[in-house]
Amino acid sequence: MTLPYQCLAACSRSTGDGDEWALFGAAGSELVVQSSTGIASVWPAEESQAKNREEAQEPAEKRVKLSPAVEQKPNFTTLKVSHDKKHLIGTTAEDKCIRVFEIEAGWRLKQISERCMARRPCSIDLTSNDSTILCADKFGDVYSLPLIPPPEDELNVMPESEKAQKKFLPSASLSTVHSGRNRKVLEEQLKQAEKGRPQPKDAPKFKHDLLLGHVSMLTDIVSATVGSRSYIITVDRDEHIRVSRGLPQAHIIEGFCHGHEEFVNRLCLTQSGRLISGGGDAHLYVWDWLSYRLLEKLPIQAAVLDYFQKHPELELPVPEKEGNFKVAVSGIWNVPFGNSTEEILVACEGVPALFSFIPGSSPSLSQTLPLSGNALSVAFIGARTAVVSVDHMHKAGSTTQIRDDQGVSRIQCFSIAQDGQWARDDTLTEPLAWFSHDAGEGEHADGRAAGTDDDTARAGFSKKVRTILYGVGNLRKRPEAEAEIAT
Amino acid sequence: MPGEPAKRQKREAYKKGLEEDEAALPKKKFYRQRAHANPFSDHSLVYPKSPADMDWAGLYPAHAVKKHETKASHDLSLSEEESRALKAITKNVEIADIGCGFGGLLFALAPRFPDTLILGMEIRISVTEYVSDKIRALRSQHATSAAQDYQNIAVLRANTMKFLPNFFTRSQLHSIFLCFPDPHFKQRKHKARIVSYTLASEYAYVLRPGGIVYTITDVRDLHEWMVGHFEKHASFLRVASEEYDGEGESDVRERVRIMRTETEEGKKVERNKGEKFVALFRRVEDPPWPED
Ligand SMILES: C[S@@+](CC[C@H](N)C(=O)[O-])C[C@H]1O[C@@H](n2cnc3c(N)ncnc32)[C@H](O)[C@@H]1O
């Protein structure tokens, strides 16, 4: 069985013969590419996959710890195409890596760098000139990295900060007498002093600069330009939307958009420059972010509830009590085709539909697009088409139950019709058939864990897929639950 | 941390007794709490959505805009605007003591800067309660004085590493005190330190240009750490020691004198004849935008 596409990206290029587009999908640890011209490829390519598999099998003792096998391959969490459409940037979770691919002629992907950060990247963006990657991590920090690693990176340069701390001195002195615990630390440190300073482990050796940080897990980052000014907008699990200046003044905080009462998970800048934010609250918030003013609230939770009520075949995730139902917004996409109206598409975790909102209109919910499985990701191609990836493994409306029907497409397409409404577009079914159904090896690589009738294997596989696809709901705070200190 | 049952009962009985006598000063031994709180955990903290939603009138009742309202600011029938109006005070807090512990600094600053509102912020519940009970007692003892002593200080429970911007607006403060912060010796725990390059941006945000961060510690390594992180940050310049040590009268000197001698940790270090390291950092004006 193939894995669902947890993220999609697309890009269009004008060529001599008109417009061409390519669709990129991340299924687990693989990237699948399909173009309008019929070109199709998978990264990593077959031969390197074979090699990886061999390597993975080698040191037996290592392998014991790292079961099941697929977890050895890092899964993609984000995909982003550079503004100039020459690069695709992806982050992978397990190895905390930022991977930059060159989009070569014929839409082939060539990985040109692989930079593993100390903390797991949660979201990335590029500055408007494409020179710099902004990486927001699970620990709350934002780093900048050159898109193309400079040549000196290969020399394994030490970051400045480490050079500065050359000699190691114990931090407690004999006159510091706070507690027994401190005294023990001091003794340890004095012992350590004889051996030399302990190295901060895993400090990356490539160029990366700390720009700013929250003391909270970051969920999204957006780089924005207004006139000659650039900004970095960051959001965290503690409801904060922070507006900082862009490089080289990213240490200056300009302000906060206050108002959310639950975690914020996604940001989206619209055509006209408004900011839309969503996460665990019942509404999406529309901001005039330059003046930190809340303009409007879009009722996403009501829209989702309404959808479930109109589709009794779907089980409401919390059926006993409607009041207990809470949405977790997993994606907000600006529809790039609008000439006059601005429109966004919104996905929520475990909900088999997309919701189209038009901020400023009344009602703001303009359309609900039903899907055959839970909405995962959206990419736009051509001049009027949205490609949506759906979860073809779990039952629509559930993030835990495996579905009974086989052969559900991983992709659904919608195009804007004459009347301005979205309508299913089946003209792409044929051209995207391979991308939708066959591409990517999925589980064959690890001894066919999936697609077998073995229930435990299926359950294990489902659990793993769940961690790739569904993490947003976990951002909600549980009373008294300790937030784990991310590593 | 609630202790074993007997201890907890004693504490509760004690606090009940305290309620009956408004003017009785609290005793520290009933408020002790283990030294470290994890600044990364959720703590089920209560905090306002934004500075405008903060119930300042509850903290500084003598400075409330609407003094004799009977409605409570959390009355659900009120509009957001009305409830904000009930929470407002006539002037803003301008001094924050971050990680104020048992509040020694607050109680010493209160009479010396009577016209300034000063706020202590502390993450440990029990320690916060002590300071709050002591403020109540002191206010009650001075209730008849014309000067309204101790109406200019207040304390609240907060994790300042996460929520400072929920309490203060941009450029609101002129002074921030970071007195004897927890040193978090282990490398692994350095992110828990209350000073870092990235937190300096938040301190700069709530401080007005010209405002000062006051730091003191007895841990040399932590002192160097704080100096290193603030000096690296372009929003701060270190204040020369001539400006706060030595002869002459100025508010800055006065504050440094109090900081050296009046906090509980400072007194402990004094008793142990430990060294104290002081460093001050001035918040500079933001530079013009590039290419503006
Ligand atoms: C060593 S004590 C110093 C107390 C006081 N400033 C003094 O000098 O006596 C440090 C205090 O900071 C508090 N603290 C640590 N992290 C904090 C945070 N994130 N927010 C608020 N207070 C914090 C601790 O609970 C502790 O009471």
Image (cartoon, rainbow, N blue to C red):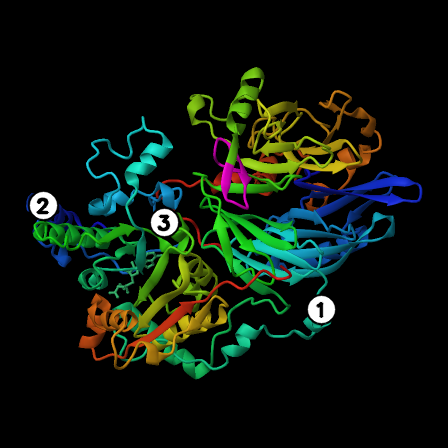
Instruction: Please name which of the two marks, 2 or 3, marks the residue nearer to the observer.
Output: 3
Please tell me the numbered disc located at residue A137.
Answer: none
Instruction: Name the residue located 35 percent from the left edge and 77 percent from the top edge.
Output: B220
> Taking A18 as reference, is A159 left or right?
left
In depth, the one of B67 and A178 nearer the eye is B67
Residue type at numbered disc 1: Pro
**Residue linked to disc 2:** B13
The x and y percentages for residue A330 are 58, 37
In depth, the one of B234 and A25 nearer the eye is B234
> Taking A453 as reference, is B27 left or right?
left
In depth, the one of A69 and B227 nearer the eye is B227
Splitting the image into 4 quarters, where does residue A310 fall?
top right
Residue type at numbered disc 2: Ala
Tags 2 and 3 both on a single chain:
yes
**Residue linked to disc 3:** B167
Instruction: Name the residue located 50 percent from the left edge and 68 percent from the top edge.
Output: B234
> Taking B79 as reference, is A24 left or right?
right
Q: Ligand 1 within 8 A of label 2's CB?
A: no
Q: Is residue A413 visible?
A: yes
- Kindly check if marks 2 and 3 are in contact, taking CB atoms under 8 A apart as contact: no
In the rendered image of this protein, does residue B70 appear above or below residue B181? Answer: above
Separation of residues labelled 1 and 2 (CA atoms): 67 Å
* Residue range highlighted in magenta: A277-294
Q: Which of disc 3 and disc 2 is earlier in sequence?
A: 2
Please tell me the numbered disc located at residue A150.
Answer: 1
**Element carrying mark 3:** helix
Instruction: Name the residue located 33 percent from the left edge and 32 percent from the top edge.
Output: B82
Chain name for mark 2: B
Chain name for mark 3: B
The x and y percentages for residue B100 are 27, 60
**Element carrying mark 1:** loop
Circle 3 Cα neighbour tier, 10 Å, few/some/many (<14 / 14–19 / ≥20): many
